[in-house]
Amino acid sequence: MTDIRRPVPRPSPETTEFWEACRQERFQMPQCRDCGSFWFPPSAFCPQCWSLHWDWREASGSGQLHTFVIFRRQYHPAFPTPYALGVAQLEEGPRVLGRILTDGLDRLHVGLQVKLVWDHTGEWNIPAFQPVYDSGIEEPKVMGILKKLSG
Amino acid sequence: MSNPNRALSGKYAIVGIGQSELGQVPGSSSLGLLNEAMHRAVEDAGLSKKDVNGIICRGPDDIYTHHQRMGELLGIDAEFSTTLDNGGASQILSVILAAMAIDAGMCDVVLCGYGRDSWSRTHRDTATKMSVPLVPREQERSEFNAEVGMFGAVAMHAFGASRHMALYGTTKDQFGSVATAFREHALRNPNAQMKEPLSLEKYHQGRPIVDPFNVYDCSLVTDGAGAVVVCSAEMAKDLRQVPALISGFGTFNNLRGWFHDEHMTDTAARQSGEKAFSMAGIHPHDIDTAQLYDCFTYMVITQLEDYGFCAKGEGGPFAASGSLRLDGSLPCNTSGGQLSEGHVEGMLQIVEGVRQLRHSYEPDRQVADASWALVSGHGGNTVCHSSLILQRGGA
């Protein structure tokens, strides 16, 4: 029997609160009180300075694509192809893996501005991304990093 | 950054090599294949079972205490033995650890090896093809993974390829030049899994898997095993084979992950390679043949840069210029590599490096006058790396 149900997260004690917030469509991540850095996925202490003192902060939801791929071969019956996955660099710093929900697969590129959206699947809200041009906002012409590195 | 002890350079050697039947071996078991390869490696060295007192190995992730299972099959109680868990970086690490263990007086002769039955596991019948994951589900990340649609090593490496293309203008033609060069080598190797020529045109027609990779960018699904015997260079003098001296080694592991910093386009091969070259006291231009961990075409491109064979961003043009071919400036994966010979997690690349240094082949497969070989290993959630520099001994 083929299981077509979509895989669901199996939270750890460190991530339970994160997934609870997702249910209310809030993407929150830890920020260190001592060194100020954000990190993701959530864990018990700051991986930068090992401080135990941190707070949950809600992300602005704004980021850009560090990289992306397009699945052509179907790996799982719940994920018909083609679909895109991206690693988005959030403006707070952490990079987050997620689906890129768009009809314009051929317009994706590294450096593309994206915003966090929610992929509603049964009882879970899974963080995903959407190109900013899909929301009617003009994308910046050339990303600074690309200009610098390819020049 | 620390550097491996130069006093160990050339003090230990690979004196025996072996491999099992390779490719699609219906009904095989990973343990059985490795048993065969290890037996051959000891025979090749002109040693016998009673000489071996160390075992360092690896197999499928679902076999608990793998080295015990091998010792049981081989009938050996070891003074030093363990199983490694650095993915594709494990196999070179086993050779490094063997030298370290012998140097520390833990043992004298170490059998290193890796075996898998991946083709048999996934192709037993049509039903198994989709339902048997090579990494047991319990060992996969339980969140921030499958729920977003993330599956497998192809996509992880494709993320790196995609970014490298954006940053440096690397092209599919350049990935294709890696695949076609290694296929050409495989056609000279009667044991290779791939028997058909691969042109650049045919490469571009490959079945898409995860863009930017198609099927020809991906290494093979293989049943097979490889093994080597490591002992002191002193002891090697009395053995039958030309020793491959372990001249340099290094490891580096970007454990924070593939998504951090520029890990996917500036890999741990850089630091690992620097350590190995420093220990060996040579430079990239001294290398006669490179046996690079080619799980995907892209990984060859970035390693060429990370090891310093060319500048960052120039790996694509370097490969496309024909450098990797047997008659090129850096004959690479001369047995066909994991893309075309068979994917035995880098173990066969060590074996091939040794064969080239022994001058085992007729001219159509032999890197002329090969005296230095670089072998690389990469894996462990895409961030672990190990490097080995071998020198032809006995001159």
Image (tube, coloured by chain):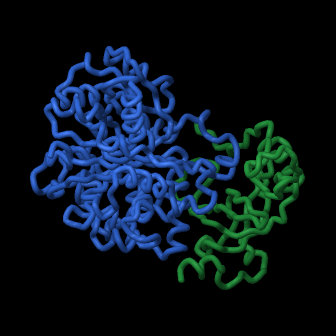
Chain colours: A green, B blue
Task: Residue A104: give x, y in percent of width and height.
Answer: 64, 73
The image position of residue B148, as x and y in percent, is: 68, 52
Image height check: is A128 above or below A136?
above
Which is nearer the eye, B155 or B308?
A: B308
Tally of marks: 0
Quick one: B207 or A65, which is closer to the camera? A65
Question: In the orientation shown, which residue stands out farthest toward the front?
Answer: B7
> In the displayed structure, does residue B162 sit left or right of residue A145?
left
From the viewer's perspective, is B267 left or right of B292? right
Left or right placement of residue B92 versus residue A68 in this view: left
Answer above or below: position of B120 versus B354.
above
**Percent position (x, y) of residue A117?**
79, 62
Q: Residue at x 63, y 39 (%)?
A: A3
Can you see residue B188? yes
- Classify residue B393 by image quadrant: top left
**B20 in relation to B343, above or below:** above
Residue at 79% x, 54% y: name it: A120
Residue B116 can be seen, yes or no: no
Residue B169: x and y, percent?
48, 76
Horizontally, is B369 left or right of B57 in the view?
Answer: left
User: In percent of the image, x 16 and y 30: which residue is there?
Assistant: B239
The quarter holding residue B259 reads bottom right
Q: Nearer the viewer, residue B259 or B210?
A: B259
Which residue lies at the image location 13% right of the left edge and 49% below the top edge? B361
